[in-house]
Each structure stands twice: as C-alpha cells, then as structure tokens.
Image (cartoon, coloured by chain):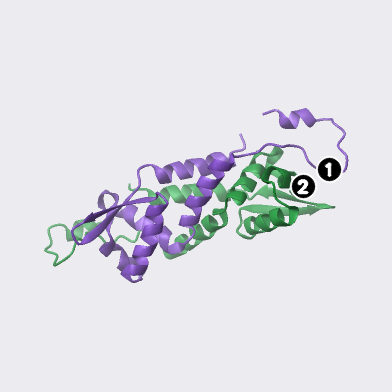
Chain colours: A purple, B green
Amino acid sequence: MTTTEAVTGAVLDNTCCSSTNTGVDAETARELATAFKALGDPTRVQLLALVAAHTESEACVCDLTAPVGLSQPTVSHHLKILVDNGLLTREQRGRWAYYRLADGTLPELARKLTSVISVD
Amino acid sequence: MTTTEAVTGAVLDNTCCSSTNTGVDAETARELATAFKALGDPTRVQLLALVAAHTESEACVCDLTAPVGLSQPTVSHHLKILVDNGLLTREQRGRWAYYRLADGTLPELARKLTSVISVD
C-alpha cells in the first residue's frame, strides 16, 4: 500500500497521524479472536498440548483428567469449548470420547498470527 | 520420552489410556493463556494489526480510533490490556500516546503455539 507515501510532505493540522492502513479485515479479526479466546485458559492450553503429545495426536478423556488435576466433568467442559471452536474434534467410541487436534487449525492460527503482525 | 513405550504390551484393566505425557508445563500454559486471553477480542486483534501495519510499527492512539470505529476511551482501554499483557509498549509524547509492538513477543507466541502442538 502507498497510503503513508500519499501523506508524506503534506501539511497536517493538529495531527500525528500518518496512515489509514487497516491491518486486518474484520472477519479475520473475529475468527482469530474466537480461537484465541478458546485458548485463553491455562487448562485448555494444557489439554491441547496433552492431546498433541499423545500417540497419533489422539487422546481419550480418561487420559486427560489426571494430568490437569481436574474432575472429568470440568475437563469435558473445557474440551467442549475446544471442539466448539474448531481446535479439537471429538469421536465417541463405546464408553469413551476421543479427542484429536483438528487438522490444520492450529498451524493456520499460528500462521495468521504471524501474518497479522508482519510488518513487511 | 518413552512413556508410551513403557506401557506397550501391558495389560491395562478397564482403560483406554496409553500415555501420561504432560505436553506442556503449567507455567508455559499460564503464560500462553494470558497472552491468548488478551488477544481474544476482535478489536484487540485489529488494534495489534493496525499498529504492526503502521510505519515503523508505531501508531498514535489518534491513528487507531477511526479504523476500529470506537471512541478513544474504549480504544485506550483495549490498548491498555495489550500493554499490560506485554503485547504492545506505550510511550507518551506530549499530547499523544504512541504504541509499538513489543519486541519479539508475538513471534515468540506463534513459536510457542506451534511448539505446544507439535507432534514430533
């Protein structure tokens, strides 16, 4: 964009402003914020990391309660938030629910975070 | 770690569990969650992107109100949250406050997010 160039040398009254660059579109900002909000809890970060660290990146809810030191209903509540926000997928098999990292969502989130703040 | 190998072939009663890998330490989970929580709002994502998009990644608060369509007090409130959580730095110069991306914080956040979910 050449927005900043356009005002170079202009006489600007009572202002410090040099650009109207919008940075990121509203839809992307909303998408990112929704995912970040879901990640804005230490237990959910731990659960995500635990699922990722499991064999084939899949974990049963019964694997996840002890490491985070919380009851199964509480863990299930956090897992539901991660599923509802597209960060994990859930599959019921008999007695247990199994959780997996949603394909590509987190790498895409890291990529978008980097791209949003890229100054190039 | 060889935790999963250790239980391979073991007879496990009434269980689906295959690993006790902790994924991420509690301190890192807390740090990440705090930063993600600060980013869990579309206006704050937009503000961060706007600052990054400005010349030399620095913007005056007066540059930021119009693009997000909010009042200056509201924008200042969101900027304060980003500053308090180490994502932006703030410098008062005369009448205006100027905001910059905190050096390295966001790339580090993207790196940690990728490392937490890495299955390798």
Location of residue B86 in the rendering, given as x and y in whole percent from the top left corner? 61, 56
Location of residue B40 in the rendering, given as x and y in whole percent from the top left corner? 54, 54
Neighbor class of circle 2 (other Cα within 10 Å; few <14, some 14-19, many 20+) is: some
**For the point 50% across and 55% down, which residue is it?**
A37
Which residue position holds label 2? B62
Q: Which mark is residue A15?
A: 1
Q: Is residue B32 above or below residue A13?
A: below
**For the point 74% across and 32% down, which residue is it?**
A4
Separation of marks 1 and 2 at Cα, in angstroms: 8 Å
Give the amino acid type for the residue marked by disc 1 in the picture.
Answer: Thr
Give the amino acid type for the residue marked by disc 2 in the picture.
Answer: Cys
Res. A18 in view: yes
Taking the image as shown, residue B66 lies to the left or right of residue A52, namely right
**For the point 86% across and 37% down, which residue is it?**
A12
Q: Secondary structure at mark 2?
A: helix
Contact (Cβ within 8 Å) of mark 1 with mark 2: yes
Marked residue chain, label 1: A
Taking the image as shown, residue B53 lies to the left or right of residue A5, namely left
Location of residue A103 in the rendering, given as x and y in whole percent from the top left corner? 35, 43
Res. B24 in view: no
Location of residue B18 in the rendering, given as x and y in whole percent from the top left corner? 22, 59
